[in-house]
Image (spheres, helix red, strand yellow):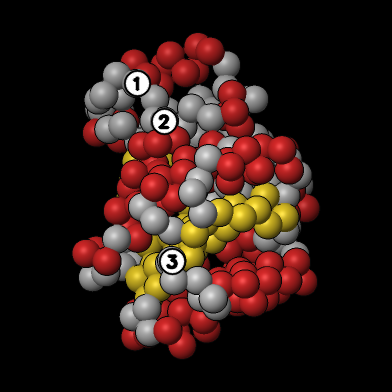
Amino acid sequence: MADKPVAVVTGAGRGIGAATALMLGRRGYHVIVNYLRDTGAATAVAARIASASVARADVCDPGQVDALVDDVLAEHGRIDALVCNANVWQPILSDVETTSWDDLIGKVGAELGGAFFITRRVLPVMRAAGSGRIVYLSSMAAGWTGKRQLTHAVSKAALNSFAQQVAAEAGRYGVSVNTVAPGAVRTDASAAFMAPEMGEHLAGHSVLGRMVEPDDVAAVIELLLDDRTGALTGALIPVDAGFDVIVGGPPRLL
């Protein structure tokens, strides 16, 4: 059984998840680096953390989630923090007329499944302990409209609503639940579909004059897991380098 607090970070092999895992490691957590496909990347992240272990599991599969949580509890006896970050389904950039029902419900179902199954298992553990922190990674895109935003925006809005319901239920048990909503973040995943000119546009229309980096988001997550912010729950916190305060609001060109 571990004396260190234990944090489970889903999708921690790269990007925001990796940055979060590293930051929590520096804060003294034993970090469970969850991943699905890239064993090498997850192992490399864990190797940079003083106390960490890797755990392969598809968070959209309830059986694999059960096995993951059972293994963590058998080894450490506790879960103090859960960061739901896994990128479970790439957004399908289409509009209403060209989106199939399977594409829409598939994206929504994957987004909610990746949060629901592990929350359902971890929340009773935190309830029994009388404390805990849960953070969901959403997106500013939940409030964006325009060309080809449908599946991504609707699925992230559904996640935001789910997080609110969990926060309302978990607060009585001493568990805080918050959602971090980044804008466009410079990661390997975003680079796969973001043209260079789009990155320049986003940076040029940011108050800070740059895109958000994974460490920017990880720093906010770290703050939400701190004992001093226990009274902050049910919040949706944007991390978008000030893009939303520019006249005209967020882009409509993704």
Is tag 1's residue or tag 3's residue first in the polypeptide sequence? 3
Work out whether residue 119 can be spotted: yes
The residue at the point 65 percent across, 53 percent down is 54
Q: Please tell me whether residue 12 is drawn above or below residue 246 in the rendered image.
A: below
The residue at the point 31 percent across, 32 percent down is 241
Q: CA distance from mark 3 to mark 2?
A: 28 Å
Number of other residues with Cα within 10 Å of mark 1, as a class: few under 14, some 14 to 19, many 20 or more: many
The residue at the point 50 percent across, 35 percent down is 146
Task: Residue under label 1, please give it.
Answer: 210
Depth check, front residue: 144 or 28? 28
Q: Amino acid at mark 3?
A: Lys
In the picture, the quarter occupied by the C terminus is: top right
Task: Residue under label 3, please give it.
Answer: 4
Q: Tag on residue 213?
A: 2
Circle 2/circle 1 CB separation < 8 Å: yes
Q: Amino acid at mark 2?
A: Glu
Secondary structure of residue under mark 2:
loop
Q: Please tell me whether residue 7 is drawn above or below residue 165 in the rendered image.
A: above
Q: CA distance from mark 1 to mark 3?
A: 36 Å
Depth check, front residue: 36 or 89? 36
